[in-house]
Image: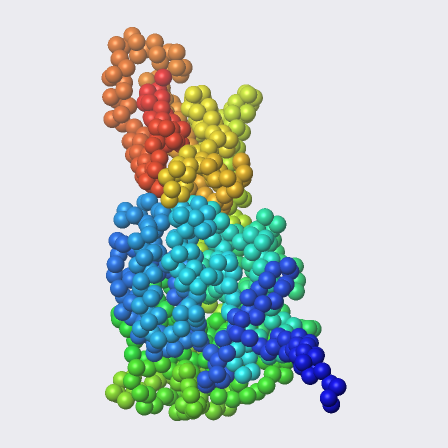
Amino acid sequence: MNHLDFPRIREMGILILTILCLNYIIPLSSIAAPLHRRQKAAGKTVSQRVIQVKEGPESVIWAVQLSDLHFSVHHPDRALDFKKIIAPTLQMINPSLVLITGDLTDGKSEDLLTMKQNEDEWLEYENVMKDVVRRSGLDKEIFYDLRGNHDNFGVPAVGGTYDFFSRHSINGQLGRRDNINSVTVETQDHKHLFVGLDTTASVGLRGPTNLFGHPTDNLFAQMDSHLSQWDHLSNKPLTKILFGHFPLSFSASSHSGKNLKDVFLNHSASTYLCGHLHSRFGKNLKRHHHQSSRNLLSSQKFFQFNIHQMSSGGTNNCPPGGPLPEFWEWEMGDWRKSRAMRVLAIDRGLVSYLDVDFSSGAKKTIVVPTFPLDSRTMSTNSGHESYRCLNMNPAPYQTVRALVFSVSPVLSVTARVYDRSPGTLNLVMETPMIKVSEEVSRGDFYAAPWNHKAFEDPSPDRFWLQIEVIDIKGSSTLTELRPFSIDGLGAKISWTWKEFFVMGCQWSALYYPIFWSAVYAFLCILLIPKLLLLFPRTQYSYKSFTAEKRYINGIFWALQELCRVPILWYGIVAYLLYLLLCPWFIGHVSTDVQETGYMTYMGWVVRSLKDVKAHEYIGSPDVMVIVLPHLFFVVFPAIFVSMAMAAERGVFKEHFLSQSGKKEEDDYRKSTKNSNINDRTRLKFCSGKRWIRKVLFAVSLAICWKHVMSCRTMMKAYDMNPLFHFPVYSFGIPFLLAYTAYKTRTIR
């Protein structure tokens, strides 16, 4: 022992312990599940933020969605109501997440014509959210807000001087700088992945040409990483929820042709939550997307004529490999006018929601049924194939369940089921619901056992559920009656025409077909009659039309009358070529008045932005809100009125000649000269009798007024002068209509 070198032994021991730590302790610490994990996928680092739900009830989680707040310096009531109502409501609900899906501020002038960023609105939003977070008692980390198109008005670059979202939003303050942010809410036996999408354009134009979402190929690569982050790392069932601002009907495809719908289906998403459309188009802005095993008709690229893309269920055949991928798109109403809020619940993977209307004030009690699901908007896991073909665990079907949030203690909860098969509602089941007791609870969850097989029926809207809650003060709260289907059959509901217009039409795909169809139609109207004039046998007249009574002859005769006014015909053709080949106008496109660009039917070219190459168009198909109304409500009516005025002159000429007994125009001119009928007298006679021309002249004035109001909107929106920035666009149509009225005033 005396020969041992104890200092050396001590150093060797420390070295061995260090090696053990490096080889065992560090790997073990990497195996432990942290709150923030990072995974590399497709060359992109994905932050895996996980919220562990430790309190009961274990089978269900819930989140709150708000959208289209539109805080405005001109409408302070929006922020005041939000602060007064939402803070205590969030405290009562205690959600796992709060999702605010865009249009946080309004960005509009008082006359609604100038659309650019206003920092005072962003300061108001920041202060209101600080107050809401503090008074609700929630962790600020669970709030996720997204940029909407109003939050992007006139923002030339993300992170720049006018990008107030990055400084004043919750995501910006918490360092969530990416266009995609994801968070996982995990219970003991289930994972719930929430992925937020910012698809606003990289260059934010002023409105109104800032209407669409513009996902890029880079964003799609990030989406693949985020949506697949748990695919091979978890043995728990996984539900994927996506949230963004723009509905799919107002989302463009990327340069490579990818679209959001295909990505959602490929990753088996359950639900897509969005806003943007407000409530003015209808309360039923929902859409079911389904991946079909057969080839889809090409028209489905442009239209979906009903809420359900295809019939759900209705067959006992089980497709090989399980049910086909599907997801629901749920647009929600706005806070701006409707004061709407949504509570989203996921119970054992089954997704349901309740939209709450605060227009009449705060609610003392909110009830969200979680099972059975509403058969009109059932989520993926409750489909017909899932129930019939996959041998699912019957446990979730054995109880009626609901979340109950109340300011006052709840005295009783009762579930009632009605049968509507005879045509009237008949009560067939009434049972009390018992609170699912937990030692520590995030919220009150009620359940009642029932025989679910007794309600299997081929009709998805035969049975209807209603839940009544009575609090300790004796106040009663009734949920709306909602149909349900244990079989997983979906009840069909239809859009109104306005709902179809905004949800069923894929406007990004429709824009160019509509535009070119209109242009080709205009050119055919102008060129074909002109070509027919070159051949004597194909020339039409009013006499031939009245003799044969063929409408095609009358149409070609009217069109050829327009061709017989050369300056007018060439002027219309030149105006159409100008719209195709030249810039429509030049204007200021961002909040910075130094940023200018010019707009064509293909989009904007912003000259002063260094990251935008020459002739790289942005804001397409957003420019359709200017282009298509101009073509259909100004250009086409102007062509029609010009043609009608030319035809009216021809009809009146024939009538005048027949009344005077003359057959040829030369004889007519000679007789009028010999009779001392001067031009002034003839003009007075014509204007007194030609009532059709008066009507057409009034229509011309209406067209000019519509065009002037559109030009006024453009002037205010982009700080333009009509004389310098868009003279042809602003004065072309009024000039053509004025020339038409002048040229057709007499029968010469």
Locate residue 18 relative to residue 174 in the image: left or right. Answer: right
Query: Which residue is at 46% across, 37% downward?
Result: 608
Residue 47 seen? yes
Q: Is residue 710 above or below residue 400?
A: above
Q: Observer-nearest residue: 57 or 644?
A: 57
Query: Which residue is at 48% across, 71% downward?
Result: 377
Query: Which residue is at 30% across, 9% downward?
Result: 673
Q: Position of residue 639 (x, y in %)?
A: 42, 32
Q: Quadrant of the image for the N terminus?
A: bottom right
Q: How many numbered tags mark residues here?
A: 0
Q: Is residue 383 above or below residue 538?
A: below
Q: Position of residue 165 (x, y in %)?
A: 40, 55
Looking at the image, the residue that sits furthest to the top is 674
Locate residue 327 relative to residue 570 in the image: left or right. Answer: right
Query: Which residue is at 51% across, 89% downward?
Result: 398
Q: Observer-nearest residue: 447 or 202?
A: 202
Q: Is residue 667 above or below residue 247?
A: above
Q: Is residue 561 above or below residue 4?
A: above
Q: Position of residue 396 (x, y in %)?
A: 53, 85
Q: Position of residue 51 (x, y in %)?
A: 49, 75
Locate residue 705 relative to residue 403 in the image: left or right. Answer: left
Q: Observer-nearest residue: 353 or 182?
A: 182
Looking at the image, the residue that sits furthest to the front is 2
